[in-house]
Amino acid sequence: MKSIMLRNGFGVENLTLAEMPKPEPEAGQILVKLKAASLNYVDLLLVKGQLDPNLRLPFIPVSDGSGIVEAIGAGVTGFAPGDRVATTYIPQWVDGRCTRENSRFETRPGSGTTPGQLLEYKVMQPNELIKIPAALRYAEAATLPIAGVTAWNALAYGKIKAGDTVLLHGTGGVSIFALQFAKAAGARVIITSGDDQKLAQAQELGADHLINSKQHPDWASAVVDITHGEGADIVVETIGGSNLAKSIHALRLGGHIAVVGFLGGVESTINLIAFNLKHANIYGFSVGNTRDFADMLRAVEANAIPPIIARSFPLEQTAAAFSYLESGRHFGKVVIEW
């Protein structure tokens, strides 16, 4: 069977096509014929050696995938051959609160210890999989484990309700999912981007107010003006760095900021007086659990929400897919199909 391996060093140029023997499921295991994968920023960090510079190579990257159950081992319940499935990103965290035991980084596929999803067949445990709605294509389902669940929880933790104002930054996978989920909840969406074409695409998906952050660097004041001095109820902070301080300025009193990304930097300096006066709730989290995933899937199905795919690449062009992700030209998700 075919797979993609990172070998001979870090860097997109070291992603190579390889042949491996097809595995067979043992007792308690499930053999999945994978069909698609989607790329996240964490995958790019791993490939570039910035997530774990001591990663042992060769390594099969990419955390999110989808496919069809081909066979099950003795004792497996809840799944059967022919089931359409997506992978879970934090497989030990099935429900309840996040703990050190159920969220260990080494259990996350494609993140440094457990192999990822860029291969044709993979043996998995039942908790590594979730069934997907019939209406979703494999490529669409593959976009959900990290970006979809993250966007879902960013809004859920903020207790979104109809009439709320949600502020989003950029047009990557998390922001676009958050746009779709917010509109399904009856919220008003303000979105920032430095690209007018992407802003126009966001408007087509229902964004109510568009702010070009390059043309209007004081976009936080623009958000306050749009909301008649109130500010946004929920901010999905996908950029991090110095952007967080501006998001606090754009927030209403007692509002919620979900810090889910760090494209603009992993360290932030904020004015604690402004933070306190805003009664701001700032929380960070890593994706979510399997119950969150199931809740999100029901919402996707009930509202007929189509995951937005910017571009699809064949397995043999995995390096090109990573380069496209790194370029920032995408609107929505970048996927690989085979």
Image (cartoon, rainbow, N blue to C red):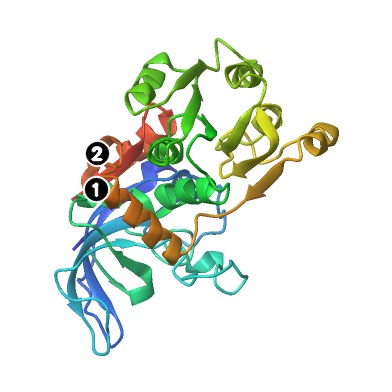
Compared to 68, does 332 lie above or below? Answer: above
Tell me what residue is drawn at x 42 percent, y 14 percent. 196
SS at mark 2 in the image: strand
Cα–Cα gap, marks 1 and 2? 8 Å
Q: Are marks 1 and 2 in contact (CB under 8 Å)?
A: yes
Q: Nearer the viewer, mark 1 or mark 2?
A: 1
Q: Amino acid at mark 2?
A: Ser
| Residue identified by numbered label 1 | 139
Left or right: 6, with 264 as reference point: left
Q: Position of residue 111 (x, y in %)?
A: 47, 59
Q: Say which quadrant the N terminus sits in.
A: bottom left
| Residue identified by numbered label 2 | 312
Decide if residue 62 is in sight here. no
Left or right: 331, with 71 as reference point: right
Q: Position of residue 39 (x, y in %)?
A: 37, 45
State which tag comes first along the sequence, 1 or 2: 1
